[in-house]
Image (cartoon, rainbow, N blue to C red):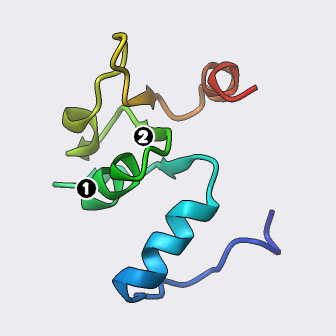
Amino acid sequence: MADKVKPNFVFVPEEERILHYGACDTAVFPSLYEPFGIVSLEAMALEKPVVVGAKGISGFRDQLIPSDPDQTGVQIDSGHYSIGAKYFA
């Protein structure tokens, strides 16, 4: 995985960002601090499944419908990887 993950942050134009979301299978945002979390909204707008951390100060949690017929994503506590794996097996 290390050969596929960039170790730094790169800001990209909107057109390129849309292509990145389009190429992904799942959008994962494990942030402990993210007051609003527009990236998860962008991913959901492109109908990508979203996984967010369930702890910390995170606006991500407030954006998700975690268990409903209209489910928009999954909240996972850090260290509970087996829980997340069942959603994406």
Residue 32 location, x and y as percent? 35, 49
Residue 88 location, x and y as percent? 68, 29
Q: Provide the secondary structure element on which disc 2 rests.
A: strand
Above/below status of 42 relative to 74: below
**In front of the other: 39 or 78:** 39
Residue 57 location, x and y as percent? 22, 45
The quarter of the displayed image where residue 72 is located: top left
Above/below status of 45 relative to 78: below
**In front of the other: 85 or 20:** 20
Q: Provide the secondary structure element on which disc 1 rests.
A: loop
Above/below status of 19 relative to 55: below
Amino acid marked by disc 1:
Gly
> Horizontally, is 3 left or right of 56 in the view?
right
State yes or no: discs 1 and 2 in contact (Cβ < 8 Å). Answer: yes
**In front of the other: 86 or 78:** 86
Q: Residue shown at 79%/69% (left/top)? A: 2
Name the residue beneath numbered marker 2.
Answer: 52
Q: Residue shown at 37%/31% (left/top)? A: 54
Above/below status of 6 relative to 75: below
Name the residue beneath numbered marker 1.
Answer: 37
Amino acid marked by disc 2:
Val
Q: Residue shown at 38%/89% (left/top)? A: 13
Q: Residue shown at 33%/19% (left/top)? A: 70
User: Label 1 to label 2, Cα distance in Å?
Assistant: 10 Å
